[in-house]
Image (tube, rainbow, N blue to C red):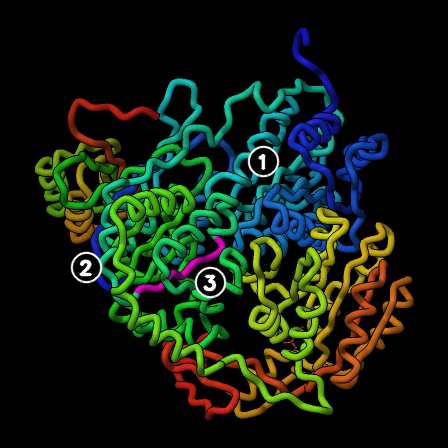
């Protein structure tokens, strides 16, 4: 099946907010052998009647279309958008909390790099920082990897959330 | 009516069923569904069939649904009742059968406490239903049940499970009629892409070697799909093959019908699929039993695929034109265009000759025997002796199933009820009970293997209790025949655990349940037994003792291509790779 070039795809899925929906979608992914790089879900409307999920997966184009069709088939799914990584039409961001434990020169370097990445220190002790960094996955990856070379690191990442650019808002 | 109608949850359940035209429920009681059973007790307008195992309830509901096109309804209790339903739900999901399974659940305040007979029914059945839901609020019950019917029937049909805690069955809630709510699947209709239809028509008009490959979607598509397929074949004279699930959509007697295709399909069907220049997949899904080795699958053809389920398009086989839509509607558009634009039938004259040459290979032929009953012969005789009646054939799974598909021709859809996708031994007998409930005056025959029948034979008791004169024609080879065949062809004749010794005496078995048992041991006895079976107004087991070593041919071994079939008279050569496939 996966003969084409593998890319990252971001699925934005709007679902009815009811028990078992997350399990239905993640279960479909595992049952069919699709991978999930990241998955986020939160209710985003006023009356909490629907939730918005972001699912990042790696697949060639044909498989990505198949995954799209499989998601659409699930009854609680209202809408699916497929966003191809590297395309311009949408904004995709994630947030990471990065705790780095270091002293001396490494500690000063950590703070300097954080400034370059526009990461804020949310917690500070004499031997550690918790930085909040946000941006594209590549930027977050780079920040984490730099911090790893400066000390012991613990990372919490939100996973990707994405939205289309422009002035047109689709209905639910 | 003034004001909202209030009633008990259990009453709501029955009211929705009746509003939706349900005539019969197949079920088995238990603690968590007692309030619903109490309602059934006082009701003369809804029939209930007490099965002997919940698997039987689901398959019976499938038999009802497959033979009518309506939603089949099953009712099971919580815990073991629900887990016993899993096989039937999965079977229905694979074969797109519209079902509603109602399950009882422990009272809401006990959910999550490992209460007696509690299980996570929705969790367990999520991957084997089209949709499932736990109803905690009695005011949502009516709406949810109406939605369940809509969902089961919409687009590609399938099973829906509604899990109802016992306290919700007791609680008073508001009843809503079908028209008093907006359907969950309303507005999810499909807009057919006319550009793609034009593209398909263009390919159809210039093809020199076309083949129609129709599937179960043409059956689910109802009268419209059947009518438009038949119209298409008349308009084009394209040779047509059908999958196991599609049999009957084009009459088997039609001169352009090539027979079934796939692993045990005919030579002409599989060769036409392999050599065609245009493949028209209508409501079929490129199952591995149909395609054989994918990289050698119909290498030189353009492929058009029409299916109501977008996820079936380009899933296993990449097609040139994929049209998402109700297959009858799309075919109608194609037919209208063809009628308007015309078609040069001369283009395919050479191809039709080629197809006739393949047909003359007579790939379903078998050697007759004076002493041993050949299973193919038994099926042929059943056909000859039942063809003038309204007959429904169900099957179990194994060699007998394939012999039935090959040798019992169907002129209409919904007369052939078999488990295709899941291949469930034990499907046929309870499915026959469901079909007989729906068609009380018809002849319903389960063409069975002895081993499959052993999985569900307790339903003889159901047949007797409800006076369902179902016929079980056992092609008894005392083997897990299909397993034995694979062991012969793929494992050097090492018959590991495929011999079934210590079988019951099926004649006495039938008698012990109050039915009639018959037996044929020689070809000369077959007609007599089948005639008596058909004429008897009671449940009958006809134990046909067949040649135990007969294999089912032709066969495309797993891992082989369509043009690499083996025949009963040929040597089998199966690749190492093929042995690893299922
Ligand atoms: C529930 C289930 N278990 C196992 C199988 C695997 N299987 C397929 S055919 C077969 C043998 C069936 O034997 P029988 O019913 O006697 O039919 P025959 O092939 O002999 O005609 C088996 C075990 C299955 N299809 N279903
Ligand atoms: Mg057998």
C-alpha distance separating marks 1 and 3: 29 Å
Find the magenta span and give its range.
B210-216
Q: Residue at x 76, y 76 (%)?
A: B527
**Residue A37 seen by the camera:** no
Which residue bears the numbered disc 2?
A5
Residue B177, above or below B197: above
Q: CA distance from mark 1 to mark 2?
A: 42 Å
Quadrant of the image occupied by residue A12: top left
Q: Label 3 to label 2, Cα distance in Å?
A: 35 Å
Q: Secondary structure at mark 2?
A: loop
| Residue B117 numbered tag | none
Towards the viewer: B363 or B389: B389
Residues behind callouts 1 and 2 on a single chain: no
B467 inside magenta stretch: no
* Residue at image mark 1: B149
Dot 3: what SS?
strand
State which tag comes first along the sequence, 1 or 3: 1
In the rendered image, residue B53, in percent from the top left (x then y), is placed at 76, 55
Residue B135 to residue B201: above or below = above
Callout 1: SS: helix
The quarter of the image holding the N terminus of chain B is: top right
Residue closer to the observer: A117 or A24: A24
Judge by depth and name the residue closer to the eye, B298 or B142.
B298
- Residue matched to label 3: B242
The reply to whether callout 3 and callout 2 are in contact (CB within 8 Å) is: no
Q: Chain of mark 3?
A: B
State whether residue B257 is above or below residue B84.
below
């Amino acid at each position: 099946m996966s003969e084409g070039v593998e890319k990252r795809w971001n699925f934005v899925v709007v679902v009815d907010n009811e028990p078992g929906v997350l399990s239905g979608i993640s279960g479909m992914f595992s049952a069919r052998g699709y991978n999930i790089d990241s998955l986020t879900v939160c209710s985003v409307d006023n009356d909490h009647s629907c939730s918005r999920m972001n699912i990042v997966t790696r697949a060639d184009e044909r498989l990505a279309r198949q995954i799209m069709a499989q998601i659409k088939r699930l009854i609680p799914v209202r809408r699916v958008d497929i966003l191809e990584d590297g395309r311009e039409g949408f904004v995709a961001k994630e947030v990471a909390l990065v705790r780095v434990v270091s002293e001396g020169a490494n500690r000063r370097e950590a703070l300097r790099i954080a400034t370059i990445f526009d990461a804020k220190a949310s917690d500070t002790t004499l031997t550690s920082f918790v930085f909040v960094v946000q941006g594209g996955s590549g930027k977050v990856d780079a920040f984490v990897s730099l911090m790893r070379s400066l000390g012991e690191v613990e990372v919490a990442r939100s996973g990707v959330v994405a939205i289309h650019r422009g002035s047109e808002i689709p209905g639910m | 009516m003034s004001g909202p109608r209030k009633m008990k949850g259990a009453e709501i359940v029955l009211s929705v069923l009746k509003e939706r035209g349900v005539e019969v429920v197949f079920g088995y009681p238990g603690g968590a569904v007692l309030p619903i059973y109490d309602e059934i007790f006082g009701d003369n307008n809804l029939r209930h069939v007490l099965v002997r195992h919940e698997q039987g309830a689901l398959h019976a509901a499938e038999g009802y649904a497959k033979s009518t096109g309506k939603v089949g309804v099953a009712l099971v209790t919580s815990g073991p009742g629900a887990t016993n339903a899993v096989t039937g739900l999965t079977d229905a999901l694979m074969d797109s059968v519209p079902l509603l399974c109602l399950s009882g659940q422990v009272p809401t305040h006990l959910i999550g406490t490992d209460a007696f007979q509690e299980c996570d029914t929705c969790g367990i059945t999520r991957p084997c239903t089209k949709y499932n839901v736990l109803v905690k609020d009695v005011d949502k019950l009516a709406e949810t049940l109406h939605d369940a019917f809509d969902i089961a029937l919409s687009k590609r049909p399938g099973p829906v499970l509604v899990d109802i805690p016992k306290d919700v069955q007791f609680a008073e809630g508001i009843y809503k009629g079908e028209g008093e709510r907006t359907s969950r699947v309303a507005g999810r209709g499909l807009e057919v892409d006319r550009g793609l239809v034009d593209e398909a028509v263009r390919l159809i008009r210039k093809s020199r070697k076309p083949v129609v490959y129709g599937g179960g979607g043409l059956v689910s598509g109802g009268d419209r799909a059947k009518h438009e397929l038949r119209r298409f074949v008349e308009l084009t004279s394209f040779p047509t093959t059908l999958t196991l699930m599609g049999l009957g959509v084009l009459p088997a007697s039609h001169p352009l019908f090539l027979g079934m295709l796939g692993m045990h399909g005919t030579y002409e069907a599989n060769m036409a699929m392999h050599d065609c220049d245009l493949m028209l997949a209508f409501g079929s899904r490129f199952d591995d039993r149909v395609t054989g080795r994918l990289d050698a699958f119909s290498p030189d053809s353009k492929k058009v695929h029409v299916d109501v389920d977008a996820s079936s398009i380009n899933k296993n086989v990449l097609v040139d034109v994929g049209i998402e839509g109700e297959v009858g509607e799309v075919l109608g558009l194609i037919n209208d265009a063809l009628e308007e634009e015309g078609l040069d039938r001369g283009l395919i004259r050479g191809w039709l000759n080629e197809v006739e040459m393949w047909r003359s290979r007579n790939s379903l032929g078998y050697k007759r025997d004076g002493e041993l009953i050949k299973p193919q012969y038994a099926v042929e005789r059943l056909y000859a002796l039942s063809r003038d009646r309204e007959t429904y054939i169900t099957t179990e799974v194994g060699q007998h199933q394939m012999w039935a598909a090959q040798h019992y021709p169907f002129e209409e859809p919904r007369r052939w009820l078999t488990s295709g996708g899941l291949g469930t031994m034990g499907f046929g007998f309870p499915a026959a009970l469901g079909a007989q409930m729906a068609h009380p005056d018809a002849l319903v025959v389960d063409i069975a293997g002895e081993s499959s029948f052993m999985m569900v034979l307790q339903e003889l008791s159901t047949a007797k209790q409800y006076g369902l004169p179902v016929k079980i024609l056992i092609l008894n080879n005392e083997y897990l025949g299909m397993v034995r065949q694979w062991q012969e062809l793929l494992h050097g004749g090492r018959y590991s655990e495929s011999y079934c010794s210590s079988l019951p005496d099926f004649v006495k078995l039938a008698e012990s349940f109050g039915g009639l048992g018959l037996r044929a041991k020689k070809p000369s006895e077959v007609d007599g037994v089948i005639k008596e079976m058909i004429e008897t107004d009671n449940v009958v087991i006809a134990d046909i003792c067949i040649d135990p070593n007969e294999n089912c041919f032709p066969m495309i071994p797993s891992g082989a291509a369509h043009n690499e079939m083996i025949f009963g008279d040929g040597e089998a050569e199966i690749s190492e790779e093929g042995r690893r496939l299922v």
